[in-house]
Image (cartoon, rainbow, N blue to C red):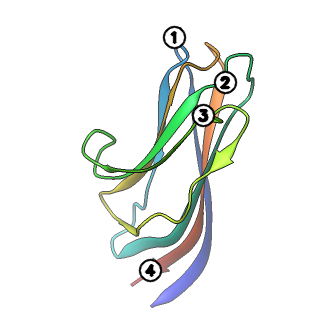
């Protein structure tokens, strides 16, 4: 078993209503992400977005891990549960600046078995 530091990001351009979803997760067989912290931010914050972070198979079927009213300015979650291949970490922004780029950054430990 090999453990490596994890620092990955995913981006989305918010739609005309200032909404968007970014997600990222392990892809390699036997890969597990744990001790995870998710940080969110948006390139602009005229309208401060609300952002909810989920982990699981899909944002709608996943487990909410935290929400923030600082989804544009920047905020981070507490620790997330482990994510295995097929699962993802999702950040869902609402009410931000239309056309702005939103970023989800996940840090933690990547274990390859």
Mark 4 secondary-structure assignment = strand
Query: Relative to 52, does residue 7 appear above or below in the rendering?
Result: below
Query: How far apart, in angstroms, are the residues tagged by discs 2 and 3?
Result: 7 Å
Give whichever of discs 2 and 3 has the lower sequence position.
Answer: 2
State which mark lies toward you, 2 or 4. 2
Query: How far apart, in angstroms, are the residues tagged by discs 2 and 4?
Result: 38 Å
Query: How far apart, in angstroms, are the residues tagged by discs 1 and 4?
Result: 39 Å
- Residue 17's disc number: 1
* Residue 94 image offset from top left, x and y in percent: 50, 24
State which mark lies toward you, 2 or 1. 2
- Residue 69's disc number: 3
Give whichever of discs 1 and 4 has the lower sequence position.
Answer: 1
State which mark lies toward you, 4 or 3. 3
Mark 2 sits on what residue? 48
The crowd level at tag 3 (other Cα within 10 Å; few <14, some 14-19, many 20+) is: some
Mark 2 secondary-structure assignment = loop
* Residue 59 image offset from top left, x and y in percent: 34, 41
Q: Quadrant of residue 44?
A: top right
Q: Which quadrant: the N terminus?
A: bottom left
* Residue 98 image offset from top left, x and y in percent: 61, 12
**In the visual, does 34 lie left or right of 57?**
right
């Amino acid at each position: 078993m090999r453990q490596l530091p994890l620092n990955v990001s995913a981006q989305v351009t918010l739609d005309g209503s200032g909404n968007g979803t970014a997600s990222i997760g392990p892809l390699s067989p036997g890969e597990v992400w744990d001790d995870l912290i998710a940080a969110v931010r948006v390139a602009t914050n005229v309208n401060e977005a609300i952002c909810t972070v989920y982990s699981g198979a899909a944002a709608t079927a996943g487990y909410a891990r935290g929400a923030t009213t600082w989804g544009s300015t920047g905020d981070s979650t507490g620790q997330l549960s482990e994510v295995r291949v097929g699962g993802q970490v999702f950040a869902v922004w609402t009410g931000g600046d239309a056309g702005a780029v939103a970023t989800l950054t996940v840090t933690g430990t990547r274990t390859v078995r």
